[in-house]
Amino acid sequence: MKITETKYFEEYSDRNGAKIIDSIKNFDFSEEKSSFEYLTKASAVYSSNIEGNSIDLNSYMNYELSKEKFKSGKEIEEIEQLIKAYEFAQTNKLTEKNLLKSHEILSKPLLIKSKRGKYRIEAVGVFGKSGISYLAVEPQFVQEQMTLFFKELDKLLNRELNKIEVFYFAALIHLRFAHIHPFRDGNGRVARLLEKWFISEKLGKQFWKIPSEEYYKNNQQKYYDSINLGVNFYVLNYDKCLHFLEMLPNCLR
């Protein structure tokens, strides 16, 4: 499936269109620097939490206030590197080169240097309590899939889209990227960063402030269930994707 797919847009728009527009009207887009920086840190913390990081937002902010009193470990480093990746994305255009750079930054605590910012050369799967729940595309096809992905992404970046379309395609980008699973580790973090990066490219820097990562964390089981459209890359049923696509606009409520 291509990320420019419009097959599901009409139903998505009927169910979410007015809600998205009304929510954006009422959302706080103040440009206070402190607020922007805080919400960037919050995004990184919640995104890390989804991947099993145990440090909550309150604990991280207390660490920031008194770093000398706390011992910095791997989980703190994961969050700090992800914050740096968000800051990099906020000041750079969304391109394949820059996406790889963002992965290089955030994956410092996750991967050896030779695998940071590089597409994987290993088979990878997603594992649940009962074993493997999803097998991603084979490593020899990752570059081919990502070339197609960015070809389609460039079309969307250069096309005029209304707010409803932006949110629809952003969620579809997130979903498809997660299914390709192009990296050895860090795919979920990059997918959530990429979703918000696309929205901000289309609608403005203030959209980095939307609480999508927090919403996904607070609805984590639904997030996992709705992203699961098949047991492997070749049997994915995107006719069931609306449950996932609808999560993003709900974060604005």
Image (tube, helix red, strand yellow):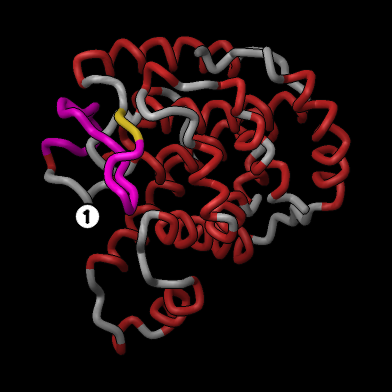
Q: Is residue 190 left or right of residue 12?
A: left
Q: Where in the figure is residue 143, as x and y percent of width and height?
A: 28, 15
- Farthest front residue? 130
Q: Where in the figure is residue 174, as x and y percent of width and height?
A: 51, 33
As helix, strand or loop, the secondary structure at mark 1 comes to loop
Q: In the image, what residue type sits under mark 1?
A: Pro
Q: Where in the figure is residue 173, as x and y percent of width and height?
A: 53, 27
Q: Where in the figure is residue 23, as x and y percent of width and height?
A: 82, 47
Q: Does the magenta run of residues contain 115?
A: yes
Picture quarter containing residue 38? bottom right
The residue identified by callout 1 is: 109
- Farthest bottom residue? 69
Q: Is residue 220 above or below residue 190?
A: below
Residue in the image at 66% along x and 30% along y: 242
Picture quarter containing residue 238? top right
Residue in the image at 57% along x and 49% along y: 222
Which residue is at the front of the view, 133 or 28? 133
Q: Is residue 115 left or right of residue 191?
A: left
Q: How many marks?
A: 1
- Residue range in magenta is 114-133
How many residues crowd mark 1 within 10 Å: few (<14), some (14–19), many (20+)? some
Q: Is residue 243 above or below residue 210?
A: above
Q: Is residue 40 left or right of residue 129?
A: right
Which residue is at the front of the view, 37 or 161? 161
Q: Is residue 226 above or below residue 122?
A: below
Q: Does the magenta run of residues contain 117?
A: yes
Residue in the image at 42% along x and 33% along y: 178
